[in-house]
Image: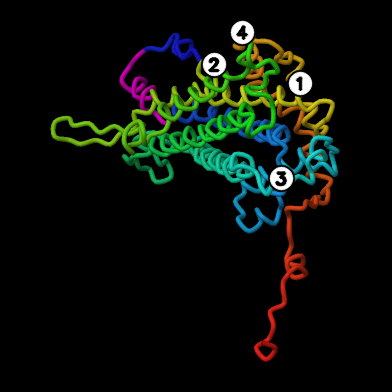
Amino acid sequence: MDYNKYSKGLTSSFPKGLALINGTQMITSLGCEAVERASAISRQADIVAALTLEVLKGTTKAFDTDIHAVRPHRGQIEVAFRFRSLLDSDHHPSEIAESHRFCDRVQDAYTLRCCPQVHGVVNDTIAFVKNIITTELNSATDNPMVFASRGETVSGGNFHGEYPAKALDYLAIGVHELASISERRIERLCNPSLSELPPFLVAEGGLNSGFMIAHCTAAALGKNTAQEYCPFPRTQACPFHLKVTFFKKTEKNITTVMPPLMGAGRMFQDPQWMPDTTVLAIELLAACQGIEFLRPLRTTTPLEKVYDLVRSVVRPWIKDRFMAPDIEAAHRLLVEQKVWEVAAPYIEKYRMEHIPESRPVSPTAFSLEFLHKKSIKIPESEDL
């Protein structure tokens, strides 16, 4: 974002300068944009991860409603629901799911079956931050405060930006987690021993590097955001919005939040400053490439729509080519929320129709009744 264009015609003065570097109005206004963009990214991350799970022939059992009812975090429940709405092969027939329904795999990797827990807490983080920002939008933060009903002017500390600043620290950490787990799913897609797909998702591996460098890019971007936006590794547990100064023997605790806030804003804006979204864009490309090696099998209807959307801007990877334009094209789909637009109608239809949850049976699943039938009778003491 070009912040200079907003400062044209601004006459500098002490109050205005303070508002720009410490004022809660500036923090809150930019925080609003960060929250909205984070919401858009997080819900599309569920769709991208669902497509990856389908390509890696994962199971939907980890999204069973009863599992999440006994740990009822709102974000976790919502993410599990989205996965079911996209992957329910009884409602949306999936030839890929049917091809491995009776495999001998007991459970999936954490990066797949723990998506409701990991993505869920990001959703709850965004909701928490949104609540604080909404309160700030409807607050009086000047000093002193004039109370006409009392006929009195009172000096206070409502100008302090700690509330939105701390919340935006939290937002940056939360959204980074989407990139962290996404990078691990990319690694599984590229690793033939884990994906049962060609190495680096390319047919002629000896001549082409495929998604090797794309995965390295995702890993580097994830590491960059961890260092840039997470307080602990950067400042040894001191939140990056906090500054302590000493002036004439007076210690002050202030929120010099604008530099890190602009950094947090960059996470959701220009392509070169959206590392978390770029990691998800790489995963989206990798998952669609994985689909190519599973053809002629088809996935569920909503995920086929996502695949078609990606293929409308990026062609399959046959031989090595400059990948930056492909990543930028997939990145643009996420920023413009195109992925959400094609999948959302299916998610909402699943919600509104209250479709009964399907629980496919597999040889690795068991029940108490099954254990009872298979148990060995222990003889009573008088029979010995």
Seen at 28% across and 36% down, the residue is 253
Residue 381 location (% of width, % of height): 65, 88
Taking 20 as reference, is 113 above or below it? below
Q: Amino acid at mark 3?
A: Phe
Front residue of 326/241: it is 326
x, y percent for residue 93: 86, 38
- Labelled disc at residue 322: 4
Q: Residue furthest bottom?
A: 382
In the image, which is nearer the foreground, mark 1 or mark 2? 1
Query: Which amino acid, by three-letter code, is at mark 2?
Result: Asp
Residue 343 position in % (x across, y down): 76, 31
Q: Which residue is mark 2?
A: 270
Residue 309 has which mark? 1
Give the class, few, some or many, for how many residues have Cα within 10 Å of label 1's Cα (few <14, many ≥20): some
Colour scheme in use: rainbow
The amino acid type of the residue labelled 4 equals Phe
Count neighbours of disc 3 (C-alpha within 10 A) and say few if under 14, some if 14 to 19, many if 20 or more: many
First in residue order: circle 3 vs circle 1: 3
Considering the whole magenta stretch, tell me its main secondary structure. helix
The amino acid type found where label 1 is placed reads Leu
Q: Which mark is residue 81?
A: 3
